[in-house]
Image (spheres, rainbow, N blue to C red):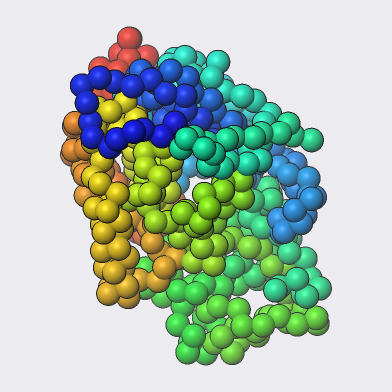
Amino acid sequence: MADAPSARSATIHPLSRHVTVIGAGASGLVEARELRREVVMRSLLYLDRPWVYTPEVESDPVGIDPDRTRVHSSMYQSLRTNLPREIMGFRDYPFVAKEGDEERDPGRYPVLTSQLYHAGHHQKDFASEFGISEMVRLESEVAFVGLVEGGKWMVKSKSKTSITTWKGKQIHSHNYRTPELFRDQVVILIGSSSSATDISRDIAGVAKEVHISSRSVASETNEKKPCFNTTRLNAMINSGYDNMWLHSKIESVHEDGSVVFTDRSVVVADTILHCTRYKYHFPFLETNGIVTVDEDDNRVGPLFKHVFPPALAPSLSFVGVPSKTLIPFPNFELQSKWIAGVLSNRIALPSQEEMMEDVKAFYSSLEASGKPKRQTHDIADYQGDYADWLAAQCGSPVFEEWRKQIMFAVAKNYLVRPKTYHDEWDDDHLVLQAYKDFWKFTTDGSSLTY
């Protein structure tokens, strides 16, 4: 967030502002770099470390108790990237393996839980390379962000120090580390996206039964079927295990340990593992109702192009809200360039009214297409067009053709080889094209390995 401007129109005179970036993960770091490039006076990042492995878990395994001991890491012991490194880096700072660096997994889908976690170390290198490290405030938590007089923002930080009636064990995937905890158990996983897919395979080798509950499954399904169907959902979770079943949503839970699904099937379980998606949650943000977070439907809004609240633009912006994208880091980069360009007055935004009309039209199109509100920020169907639009706003080149083709190749390979996609693929020619491009961003091309 930044000091509010007096006008939205762009000018040839760049502005210097005091900007606070909340979050120093991939999106926060690249935002800080782009702000610095656009002659922003000072940026401050508040850091957490969600992508550094630790065996520690929170005191409340479900993550409900507000007074629980918090652990920011969501990584489990067997975790590997679910995207290849060619599309995980920033466009001018690729996520490449370095020859001779034996401490980091050089694989295309590296293991993420070594002492020097790959992508986390890559981000640390990125921060050092672009002089961002000294801008980061460590071990701080944002407690409050609110509007004050003059269109400015007050930021306060502090140093760090339903199913509830069910009697069985419950845990959220955020606190999952190893499969051994589930040996010989009947486990129900709630969710069917990336973490559920990954963890279900991880525990199926030791658990007695693994039951996946997904709201994407029709409620009228009344058979308990092994996960070997040909639908897209089942293809994603088909792992070759005969102890995995797919169910519709949970309808009710009971004190005797039984769980009833809307398809009327019943499972007596030992553990419920919540693999539900992360929800947008900004408890520290106070905008007097201008920006709202619908936690039931997971919508942040209103946001123009998932970034700017029309009534508060450009003094408040969000990076990384879109989900279901196979090119997250480059999208963070383009969003950051756009925001920095607007804050420096190099790029003009539409009027508040025009942005609000665009948001309303977007919401209407979602409703007309039958998409639920919870998919407001899912951009899987138009992620390429979204990136091209951002690039046009920033005056940046559109994504390289190899990057777009790898994106589709990865999605196809994930469906064809759900169990072995980390180690088998058919797009080596695209990887070679990527590394030819990466060459120009290194001082010593010979240091790149593939």
Identity of the residue drawn at 75% across and 71% down: 164
Does residue 3 lie above or below 363 as drawn?
A: above
In the displayed structure image, the side of residue 265 where residue 331 appears, left or right: left
Residue 384 seen in render = no
Q: Position of residue 245 (x, y in %)?
A: 56, 74
Identity of the residue drawn at 33% across and 9% down: 444
Q: Position of residue 284 (x, y in %)?
A: 61, 45
Place residue 259 in its image quadrant. Answer: bottom right
In the displayed structure image, the side of residue 204 where residue 84 appears, left or right: left
Foreground pick, 47 / 294: 294
Identity of the residue drawn at 40% across and 71% down: 372
Identity of the residue drawn at 59% across and 34% down: 155
Foreground pick, 336 / 127: 336
Q: Residue furthest top?
A: 443
- Quarter of the picture containing the C terminus is top left
Foreground pick, 366 / 49: 366
Does residue 319 lie above or below 447 as drawn?
A: below
In the displayed structure image, the side of residue 36 where residue 349 appears, left or right: left
Q: Position of residue 150 (x, y in %)?
A: 47, 35
* Numbered marks: total: 0
